[in-house]
Image: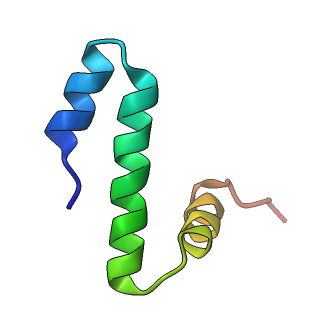
Amino acid sequence: MFDTELAEQLARHGDQAQACRVTREAFEGMCAALGVPPAEVQTEVQAQLTPKARA
């Protein structure tokens, strides 16, 4: 599962690339466990974060 402590420690010590890799691997692992393609999750999250156009 997602190791937030490891990712935070890596980021604190300036190893941002490694922290991103750990985070991405955890994200992909969670998607696989749920049987949902990572791209589908990313698209949905982006849609949720994008402000809606005002009519």
Residue furthest top as drawn: 14
Total count of labels: 0
Whole-percent x and y of residue 37?
54, 78
Tell me if residue 25 comes above or below residue 13 in the rendering.
Answer: below
Residue furthest bottom as drawn: 35
Which quadrant is the N terminus positioned in? bottom left
Whole-percent x and y of residue 5?
15, 36
Whether residue 1 sits left or right of residue 21 in the image: it is left
Tell me if residue 19 comes above or below residue 3 in the rendering.
Answer: above
Whether residue 38 sits left or right of residue 16 in the image: it is right
Q: Quadrant of residue 6?
A: top left
The residue sitting at 43% across, 50% down in the picture is 24
Whether residue 41 sits left or right of residue 4 in the image: it is right
Whole-percent x and y of residue 2?
23, 55
The residue sitting at 27% across, 12% down in the picture is 13
The residue sitting at 62% across, 59% down in the picture is 46
Residue furthest left as drawn: 5
The residue sitting at 26% across, 16% down in the picture is 12
Tell me if residue 4 comes above or below residue 28 in the rendering.
Answer: above
Which quadrant is the C terminus positioned in? bottom right
Whole-percent x and y of residue 22?
34, 43
Tell me if residue 34 comes above or below residue 48 in the rendering.
Answer: below
54 or 47, which is in the foreground?
47
- Colour scheme shown: rainbow
Q: Quadrant of residue 31?
A: bottom left
